Amino acid sequence: MPGAAIKANGLGKWFGEGEAKTMAVRNVDLEAGFGEMIYIVGPSGSGKTTLLSVLSGILRPNAGKVEVEGIDIWNLNADQLADFRLNKIGFVFQDYHLFPRLNTAENVAIPLFLRKKDWDESIGEATRYLEVVGLKERANLPPVKLSGGEQQRVAIARAMVGQPDILIMDEPTASLDGDTGHAILKFVHENILRADRCIIVVTHDSRIYEFASRILKMEDGRLTVTQNDASLLQKG
Amino acid sequence: MKGILKLAYKLLVNDKAKFTALLIGITFAVFLMMFITSMFMGVLNHASATVVNVGAPVWVMDPSVQAITSSIGMPNYVLDAVRSIPGVKFAVPLYSGTALVKLHDGTYQAASVLGLDDTSLYGRPVLTAGKIENIYADNGFIVVDDAEYRKLESPRIGTTFELNDHRAVIVGVAKVTISGLFGLPTLYTTYYRAIQYIPNPRFTISYVLVHPKSSSDIPAIKRQVAALGYMALTKDEFIRKNAAFFVFQTGAGTNILIMTLISFIVGLSISGQTFYTFILENLERFGALKAIGTRNRQLVTMILFQASFTALTGYGLGVGLCTLLVYLAKLRLASYAAMITYPSLLVSFVMVVIIAAISSYFGVRRVLQIEPFDIFRG
């Protein structure tokens, strides 16, 4: 796929005004290519999640521009932006945000329902994705019956079922033990990352750095380090 | 069903506790509204029992009459004058009054007495026992077998009793379309016997029952009766006049309105609060849907569908419950006043739609306010 998946220039985002003004993102430039798995790391409150929200069309920046596949997403109207998120981006939330009243397959199929696909067809496709993440036999169970790692895999299946070009993962290992978190990211790296897909991961967890193509370090709203050699960051 | 609606449906009904609470709230409100309005409609219907049972197409009366029970006697010339109106096929007098019946145990029971035209017996009831011509026998009365029948100790043919110190004999038992409202047993006799037995003012004709040659003659008849200084009403107009009297003159209408509003408020409180809680508990999920790419319009559709589905299901259950109760009551008491009418159904439906609209309005507002970014922040 030609060009950058995501290109951001001079991004700025702040909350509040006057003395209460908090700068969350300061003048960030960033480019993410297809086939890359980019990590954004940094301490709590450094602006990682805010940056991720701005990049994915969820939070409007106060300054700068975000282009996804050449489209300036913040020039889109509300409906176009919603469609953009639905069709181009897959989200894996920190707390998964699975629907407890739906079974696993129905949870995975949500993006397809939103695209107005037929219910049964959507469930069939969701079940195929559950098979990919190794949970086909759990398709009819509610999420509460699944372990944390399984719920994370359901969330990944839901993010992927619409075959988005960009996958956004917010603290994907935060609620998992070390081994499970490692296994999940390994799975993503080996099965989800493709030459025509870009994955952006926000994380604190240095145990999963080995899967990153690039690691961007954020501090106080700024990108301070862009590191291709993950091992250096692990040491530093 | 479209995917998004089915999704909304599953999110709603799979939360069994909340869905049940919502249904109970709406069902209860609909049941109360239906029951109260049905009772009222039943009462109005029974209030016009004599008009319906006698069945004359046109009724002539004093213009001051407000309801069938408050007749004002008219002089005999009115009957003659009405008979002479060109469009009148025939006209007969009707006496309507109340008498005291002395029962065998020595107690007294008030009874409604209708005196039918001696010649034609126009407006006579359908007899289930006895022969109508026996009404001409000495002291002959026909008793109506309705809910109040037992108050006269369930008399049979041949039963005698005292009526205003006169001897009365039951010569027939009748059934009527609608029993009266005021808890009085009904007796039919001839017009002249009625005015003999019951003390009266100077004028004794309560109503003149008119049968026009054709319905197109009615406007002219009404005009000519008005020229005499009296009033002619069609059967439907008289029923409406009776209803208006009870609604506006007795305070019953205001009371029913207040009761219906209270039911509405109870339903709105229970359902609105439960639905809002349901939305609040699912706020994060709605936020997640928004982040994933659900348009605001789709979220509004989902919430409106959930509110409408709950409201309509509750409406169906409420109407069903009310119907069942009225049916069971009528099995026990044939003349039970409540009747489910289209206006009652419509009033309850409109109220339920308003409950759904108000409940969903606050839910929609809350969901539209949530920022998907809040989902990211956790």
Image (spheres, rainbow, N blue to C red):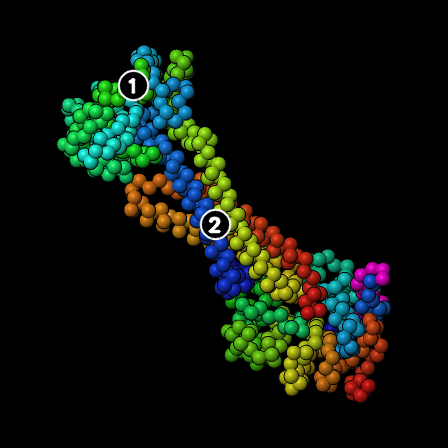
Q: Is residue B180 above or below residue A19?
A: above
Nearest the camera: B255 or B131?
B255
Amino acid type assigned to the residue bearing label 1 in the image:
Asn
Nearest the camera: B301 or B63?
B63
Residue B39's image quarter?
top left
Residue plotted at (43% across, 29% down): B245
Residue A99's image quarter?
bottom right
Residue A204 shows up from this direction: yes
Query: Does residue B217 appear to the left or right of A88 in the view shown?
Result: left
> Is residue A12 magenta-colored?
yes
| Picture coordinates of residue B279, whole percent (x, y) | 59, 60
Q: Residue furthest front?
A: B106
Residue A117's image quarter?
bottom right
Residue plotted at (16% across, 33% down): B159
| Picture coordinates of residue B112, whole percent (x, y) | 28, 29
Residue identified by numbered label 1: B200
| Picture coordinates of residue B124, whole percent (x, y) | 24, 27
The magenta-colored residue range is A5-19
Query: Does residue A198 appear to the left or right of A128 in the view shown?
Result: right
* Label annotation for residue B29: 2
Amino acid type assigned to the residue bearing label 2 in the image:
Ala
| Picture coordinates of residue B206, whole percent (x, y) | 32, 20
